[in-house]
Amino acid sequence: MPGARSISTGIWVGVGGRDEPAGLAGASHFLEHLLFKGTSERSAAAIAEAVDAVGGEMNAYTTLEYTAFDTRLPVGHLDLGLDLLCDVVSRPAFRPADLEAERQVILEELLMEEDTPDDRVLGVLAEAQFPDHPLGREVLGTRATISSIDATAIRAFHGEWYRPANLVVACAGAVDHAEVVAGVGRRLGGLAGGRAPDRSPPTAAAEPLRLLRRRTEQVHLAIGARALARHDPDRSALAVANQILGGGLSSRLFQEIRERRGLVYSVYSDATSWSDTGTLVVYAATAPGRAAEVLGLLHGELDRLARSPVTARELEVAVGALAGSTVLGLEDSGSRMARIGKALLVDGTVAGIDQLVERFLAVTVDDVARAVERVLGPGERTVAVIGPVAKRDLLPRRAA
């Protein structure tokens, strides 16, 4: 991006929440926090000061299948970005005081998540959708596992997974490719070995309902169905179906439940894909007295999507939304870097922008119907609820 005024650099590690033993649940996220606490040569304050001194940004996040670290700095500061990222990823200090301080931070993060029911209900849904499988675990871990993880376990986890065979370095902006390659080689060239984690798909049947009774002002409702893996040929068609269902302001869920009936403020759907499975989720929040009605409407829209073909106009709008958002979301160096880093790590290749758009433009009404049938046709759904309701409050009310 020769005209850009920024350089975004990221290191992507192919390990996440699903790759941890149950007793180390949350280790990937704990490690992400600890790497920012400093290296053998830099303290946490020194790292923060170096980024602030040029007006830059440095961040990291953990998912179920990978962990990412990145910087976004003004043009001319490629070396600083590579210095900081390569140092924290390859030479963390793991000072005992830092480990204990960050343990408390993550325990507070867990409490914060418990106080955020619109997030927590999705965690409850995952637990019920994927019982006894790491895809059903919270990426943050649990209070028990975070309280018990020690420095030895963290060092071993880092030593096993933060190796070259499991890393991708991505860079976008006003940079020269050869300069980036040489810079990475100087900083990480001494490392060797590594492997990607072995993963097994879930086999246990999903639970039909999980209810967490809480004294909240709204009831938070989520319905999930197991869906398509990342490399499934019908994934683009499912993305279009999701857009029609609840992906935007013109979607069926938004128009029917919020605009026409006024029963909710927030309602949406989302399709997520992992290496071996996926999930289609719908979410809404409403007053306790309306929980049964809204839950019925959510099920009704899923049923309508499964039983009736989408219209040509719905297809046109959804494809246009996905194609347009793909292009608009790649105007800055940070989003470009994230796209190529994730693509190379999880797909092994980087598709061009035009190729991504063409995948959406090629989707037909029949493609959408086939993808929806594969996901919703079996009829197996999981419901998760958080709020001041009982199971009987979720049943449809009989007419007087």
Image: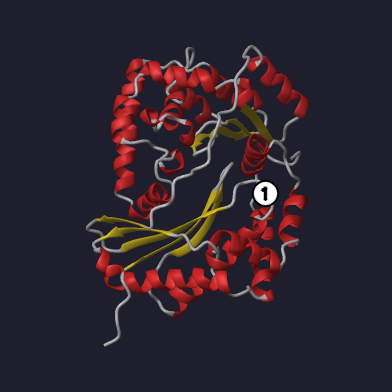
Name above or below for residue 252 compared with residue 389: below
The answer to whether residue 203 is above or below residue 36 is: below
Determine the image quadrant of residue 176.
top right
- Comparing 34 with 295, the one in front is 295
Percent coordinates x, y for residue 278 in the rendering: 54, 49
What is the three-letter code of the residue carrying label 1?
Answer: Glu
Packing grade of label 1 (10 A; few <14, some 14-19, many >=20) is: few
Is 22 in front, or is 132?
A: 132
Q: Residue at x 59, y 52 (%)?
A: 228
Where residue 117 appears, x then y in whole percent?
Answer: 33, 54
| Relative image position of residue 14 (x, y in whole percent) | 57, 31
Q: Nearer the viewer, residue 255 or 225?
A: 225
Quadrant of residue 189 in the image?
A: top right
Q: Quadrant of the N terminus?
A: top right
Residue displayed at 64% across by 11% down: 190
Judge whether residue 74 can be spotted in this image.
yes
Q: Along the horizontal axis of the image, is 198 left or right of 207?
A: right
In this picture the colour scheme is secondary structure
- Of residues 343 and 61, the one nearer the viewer is 343
Q: Is residue 89 above or below residue 263?
A: above
Q: Quadrant of the C terminus?
A: bottom left
| Residue labelled with disc 1 | 331
Residue drawn 30% across and 25% down? Answer: 148
Regarding residue 250, the answer to whether it shows in the image is: no
